[in-house]
Image (cartoon, rainbow, N blue to C red):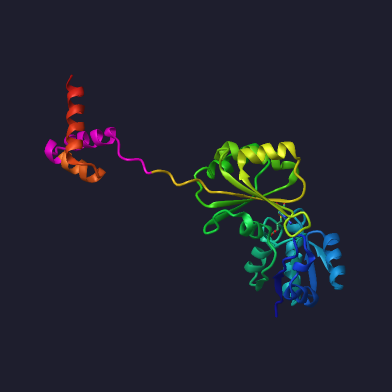
Amino acid sequence: MSGMLYLVPTPIGNLGDISVRCRETLENADFIAAEDTRVTLKLLNHLGIKKSLVSYYEHNKAAQGGKIVERILAGETCALVSDAGSPAISDPGEDLVKQCAAAGIPVCAIPGPCAAITALSISGQATGRFCFEGFLSTAKKSRREHLDSLKKERRTMIFYEAPHKLLATLTDLAEAFGGDRPISLCRELTKLHEEVVRTTLDQAVAHYTENPPKGEFVLIVAGAPAQQEESPSETDAAARVSQLIAEGVSRKDAVKQAAKELGMPKNAVYEIALKDSESINN
Ligand code: SAM
């Protein structure tokens, strides 16, 4: 009989945020796979739990994943934790979940602390539709491609960022989205110095140039405003009429059809078509 993989979220600051179910799962698991065993040991000591730990992090996950899967297939139950927050969300775990799912191992995610959702909830930005963008790459090309792909994004965007990279990221966001785009900077969530700064990208750059950023940040950036639908121009009308005429439609019918297609008054299209043909003939 195979065991099970549990994804156990841990507090992002306030230790009181560990849930009863998370605590019980950590107590009952056969072993815990942790991103940093020293960080998890501190939490386990706080909870009074003694448990065997294995490390599972970005640079050993290829080798460790297989071993963890084998143990679960042999019947053990594994609880996966990261340093803080929900495992597999910008944290090691995504690959282990894939490996377990492929091996037919049941995976259970326990709901709990997640910096992205905590920040979104208090951001004051639209929460109806949002997208999680994680950390921007530090490699210039993929960073630019990522930001370019978001220029027309209408949904609220969530980014993670480290304090020492914050100013460069805000500058790049302002360049990509325009300096007047609203942003909420959510810092040190659930901790003593929790703070939400609701401002614009330009003002955020100015603020953090003056006051070097400290602590952990989630950036909640408003989506692009809806584009005003462009009303059909004279050029569109003239082009459509001459296209229809070229296809053999009479001028009268071409005007009628173009006006209908573009939602313009017939008289206006007639005038435009007339001006156009005069300018061609002269
Ligand atoms: N898996 C985690 C989660 O779901 O919350 C996120 C892990 S990711 C490696 C770490 C990033 O989460 C930080 O760089 C920061 O952007 C954000 N973060 C974590 N704790 C935070 C906190 N207390 N306040 C603000 N941001 C936090």
Percent coordinates x, y for residue 79 in the rendering: 75, 70
Quick check: 50 left or right of 230? Answer: right
Span highlighted in magenta in the image: 229-253
Give whichever of 115, 4 is nearer the camera.
115
Quadrant where the image shows the C terminus: top left
The one of 43 and 196 positioned closer to us in this rendering: 196
Q: Residue at x 14, y 39 (%)?
A: 249
User: Could you tell whether 220 is left or right of 28 in the image?
Assistant: left
> In the image, residue 265 lies at what x, y percent?
20, 41
- The vertical placement of 107 against 57, above or below, is below
Relative to 37, say whether 205 is above or below: above
Count of residue discs: 0
Residue 229 figure quarter? top left
Instruction: Report the image quarter containing ligand 1.
Output: bottom right
- State the image coordinates of residue 1 (x, y, percent, origin top left): 70, 80
- Kindly indicate the quadrant of the structure image that contains residue 20: bottom right
Residue 224, visible in the rendered structure:
yes
Q: Quadrant of residue 83?
A: bottom right
Residue at the spot 28% in from the left edge and 36% down from the top edge:
236
- Please, what is the dominant secondary structure of the magenta stretch? helix
